[in-house]
Amino acid sequence: MSKPTVAIVGRPNVGKSTIFNRVVGERLAIVEDMPGVTRDRLYGPGEWLNYTFNVIDTGGIELGDEPLRVQMRAQAQIAMDEADVILFIVDGKDGLTHADEEVAQILYRSEKPVVLGVNKIDNFKQRENLYEFYSLGLGDPIGISGSHGIGIGDLLDSVVSHFEQEEKDEYDETTIKFSLIGRPNVGKSSLVNAILGEERVIVSDIAGTTRDAIDTPFTRDNQEYVIIDTAGIRKRGKVYEKTEKYSVLRAQKAIEGSDVVLVIINGEEGIIEQDKKIAGYAHEAGRAIVIVVNKWDAVKKDTKTMDQFKRKIREQFQYLSYAPIVFLSAKTKQKLVNLLPTIQMVAENHAMRVQTSLLNDVINDATAITPPPSDKGKRLKIYYATQVSVKPPAFVLFVNDPELMHFSYQRYLENKIRDTFGFIGTPIRLMVRRKNEQ
């Protein structure tokens, strides 16, 4: 089951990005005392009282040259569509404004829980500024100070009280869940249709024509799969088509529920920066990855074209050196037969467990061939290695002093593990701990 999503909405300069940073615990968004300045990430992880959830800072959703009021309404609309709980932030120093009332009118229609936070309540004397916000009809306003961290706990208590109890995943553990991510018009919907062998998704040459999120189970060669199509654009298409960041948001949500992520590249257009950004989210999330070059039928080719394209991918996606590359055409189904076996292979590698004795044999052989580094006469000693988790495979090395582990030697050991056990298509995590440390 995917995590709940909390959207932070409100007019510009009420402190949405400051509160976003407080909730996710990192400075992911740019903060500056000017309206409309948010330019960085609009999506991050939050955690409170054993709940984990996603947080959207709608201030980061830019809508081009639209007037500010239209942008605000569009951002609130996106929040209504995507969020399980809406966090409505107003400014306690400015007091209730007509713009606040307009946003509240939109939120009434959402039928989603709304938590009202009154920001910039920096001391007890300012709490009387809360009273006028009762007129919004959104329940008890909660006084907070994003800049000082006051009241954030009370605010999050209210937010998580609206979360439903977590349900078990409806799919069996052996089911492979995979998503298709990529910028608009790379052929995600066409590929879904080609895999399923039926027209389940609207397909058009116009970027951004998919209107429904798709979660489709199917069985092939006795293996159960679920396709999670990021597609992406829901009812009010024009709102979403104006923001590239929105497609990233939807990609992130699909990644979260997947075992394997297909990074789709348009073979006609080649690789652009947005492809690398979207693929980076799947890598950071630790998902198994297959790079799929679609529309290969439309590419003018000679005997060197495929190898040249592979080299470009490896140069541009250096952090995905473990990911296999599949060239195909969703339109003609050329080479489509290679895709599902590749997905199954990387899913198995993603869930692979290595025997502890075999793992330590590999580490011992590696250290014998290339001894660990030393610093100021003190040499790194690796006592023991063990695998601690899967999806992605994660290993802990217990050593005498973690400070002696140089990143290049850690990469060397990771490569030795890959050379021995494969792990094609999946990132692996290598952590270093002092002996006897948990």
Image (tube, rainbow, N blue to C red):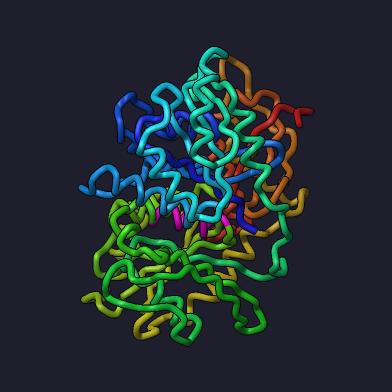
The answer to which image quadrant residue 31 occupies is top left
Residue 214 percent location from the top left of the image: 50, 71
Closer to the camera, 32 or 271?
32
Q: Give the range drawn in magenta.
A: 247-256
Which residue does the image show at 33% across and 38% down from the upper left? Answer: 39
Q: Quadrant of the C terminus?
A: top right
Which residue does the image show at 72% across and 45% down from the upper left? Answer: 388
Which residue does the image show at 52% across and 26% down from the upper left? Answer: 130
The answer to whether any part of residue 292 appears in the image is yes
**Eyeballing the image, is 21 above or below 159?**
above
Closer to the camera, 314 or 193?
193
Closer to the camera, 111 or 434?
111
The answer to which image quadrant residue 183 occupies is bottom left
Q: Is the magenta stretch mostly helix, strand or loop?
A: helix
Q: In this view, does 172 lie to the left or right of 313?
A: right
Q: In this view, does 157 lie to the left or right of 32?
A: right
Q: Quadrant of the N terminus?
A: bottom right
Residue 323 percent location from the top left of the image: 48, 59
Residue 192 percent location from the top left of the image: 46, 76
